[in-house]
């Protein structure tokens, strides 16, 4: 089931429809309890959300919120899934903090010069 959804998402993305791809992922993950532990769907949704933000679009949820939901809906005994979520969450947070620091340095340089 999750591989079919991922194929549909890839098709939508290849055809320039990121909003529809995001909607499909969010609906799939919220529709039933049986799909809540599909790691790749959660990761794809978070990745898509981050790409949408980078492109200046507004995703339905930020990637940090998506990954936190993934933690909540994935059983704790699925350690590999939790490790993947945590790794992606930390990557997003670190990239944001480094870009914030870079923006602050650029503003400081503009004020000086």
Image (spheres, grey):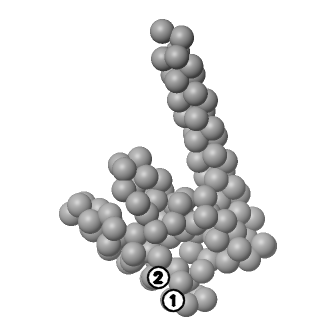
In the rendered image, is residue 97 in sight? Answer: yes
Q: Is residue 37 above or below residue 11?
A: below
Residue occupying image coordinates x 60% and y 89%: 33
Indicate whether 110 appears above or below 69: above
Most extreme residue toward the front is 111
Quadrant in the rendering for residue 17: bottom left
Near mark 1 (Cα within 10 A), the count class, few <14, some 14-19 or many ≥20, is few
Q: Which residue is mark 2?
A: 28
* 1 and 2 marks in contact (CB < 8 Å): yes
Q: Residue at x 39, y 77 (%)?
A: 24
Q: Nearer the viewer, residue 46 or 84?
A: 46
Q: Which element carries disc 2, helix, strand or loop? A: helix
Say whether residue 19 is left or right of residue 92.
Answer: left
At a point 60% along the width and 80% down the height, the residue shown is: 36
On the image, the x and y values in percent for residue 11 come to 27, 67
How many numbered discs, if any?
2
Q: Position of residue 93 (x, y in %)?
A: 63, 46
Residue at position x 59%, y 47% in the image:
92
From the top left corner, tell me how far across and down residue 110 is, in percent: 48, 17
Quadrant of residue 9 within the rendered picture: bottom left
Crowding at mark 2 (Cα within 10 Å: few <14, some 14-19, many 20+): some
Q: CA distance from mark 1 to mark 2?
A: 5 Å
Mark yes or no: residue 6 visible. Answer: no
The secondary element bearing badge 1 is classed as helix
Residue 13 vertical placement versus 24 (above, below): above
Identify the mark at residue 31; answer none if there is no mark: 1
């Amino acid at each position: 089931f999750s591989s079919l959804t991922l194929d549909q998402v890839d098709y939508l993305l290849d055809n320039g429809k990121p909003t529809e791809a995001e909607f499909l992922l969010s609906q799939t993950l919220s529709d039933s309890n049986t799909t809540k532990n599909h790691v790749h769907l959660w990761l794809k949704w978070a990745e898509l959300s981050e790409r949408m933000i980078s492109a200046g679009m507004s995703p339905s949820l930020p990637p940090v919120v998506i990954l936190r939901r993934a933690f909540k809906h994935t059983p704790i005994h699925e350690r590999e899934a939790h490790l993947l979520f945590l790794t992606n969450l930390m990557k997003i947070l670190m990239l944001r903090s480094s870009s914030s620091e870079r923006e602050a340095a650029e503003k400081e340089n503009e004020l000086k010069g």
